[in-house]
Image (cartoon, rainbow, N blue to C red):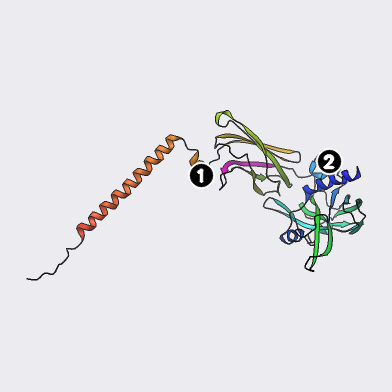
Amino acid sequence: MRRLIRMIMLAAVAGILMPATGALAATMSHIRPDAQRFGARIVDVPVSEAHDYRAYEYFVDYLPSNTTVHRRIMIVNDERHTAHFAVYPDAARISRGLFTGDAGATRSELTGWISVQHPVLTVRPESSVMDTVTIKVPRTATMGEHYGVIWVQQAAHTRTAAGLGVNEISRVGIRVYLAVGRGGAPPTAFSITSVNGQRTADGHPSILVHVRNTGGRAVDLHGTVRLTGGPGGTSAGPFPSQQVVTLAPGQSWTMTFAPAEGLPNGPWLAAVTLVSGLTTRTATATIQFAGTAGFLLGLPLAAWGAGLLLAVLVIATVWGRHVADGRRRVRLAPAARVPFNR
């Protein structure tokens, strides 16, 4: 039972891993399949955020300046040997729809407020330990939302078959969304600004939903699109978003949904539902999957005939002008002088 609980927690942690940098991804590709299996999760959730499921995965909080809070985290070692971990805060940023934690203890205003009770931990095989993260917001803290990550890192040194030494570094992280202000937490809001259909270069249907964060806190967006009113009254979906999109206040991005292959061009009525925490937005729009090839294949017979007639008229007009210009050049050419003998 204990092992089952640990495996469930590790599966949950997979949803909060930070995107790896190129160097980290390259390092991870050399890690043995049975090595470095561990995870981390939050234990304490603030009462003010208990209704938000995001607070059970990340540090999501609103604090006035000159405030100190303590949050416990659990580190699980599911390996068959004793493991050593480093626990530390790092800077993070939100850009192009992604929340990305830096690698290497990059400093920021937020990381200067964070301390870890046990920066170095030793965990026995198939065991877990608690650690405490303290966030102390100074009186002079900048108002607004700050982003960071608490990394749990394991390093190992191995040798390849060729005898080369390889340093293996693995990290799992817990995001930090901390809003600082006065008079209550800023609102969470976002808007769906457009919904469009298209076909990819290889002909697959795709739905593009453009979203803007209009509130005062970051949002982690996911959702679905359902299609109704298609050719012959058909319907399809719902289709989930291909990724979770994170937007800071004022940012916008396009979410992608991939319907099943083989759907006709439409038109379709697309019903979009997007969610971040307890905030939900919906929108409907009439779309068609009319890309380059898809658009041509979806044209009715009358449109094909009109297009063909237009093409013939254009070709005839161009050819007529070409022939007329050639005749004028022949008439205006000087007469040739042919020598002859008397």
- Which corner quadrant of the image does residue 154 belong to? bottom right
Is the C terminus in the top left, top right, bottom left or bottom right quadrant?
bottom left
Q: Position of residue 210 (x, y in %)?
A: 63, 44
Q: Position of residue 302 (x, y in %)?
A: 42, 34
The disc labelled 1 sits on which kind of residue? Ala
Q: Spatial distance from mark 2 to mark 1, Cα to Cα? A: 49 Å
Is label 1 in a helix, a strand or a loop? helix
| Mark with earlier residue (2, 1) | 2
> What's the residue at 51%, 44% (across, down)?
293
In the image, residue 161 above or below residue 140: below
Q: Is residue 148 magenta?
A: no
Residue under label 1? 293
Magenta residue span: 189-201
Q: Nearest the camera: 41 or 133?
A: 41
Residue under label 2? 50
> What's the residue at 50%, 41% (across, down)?
295
Is the N terminus in the top left, top right, bottom left or bottom right quadrant?
top right
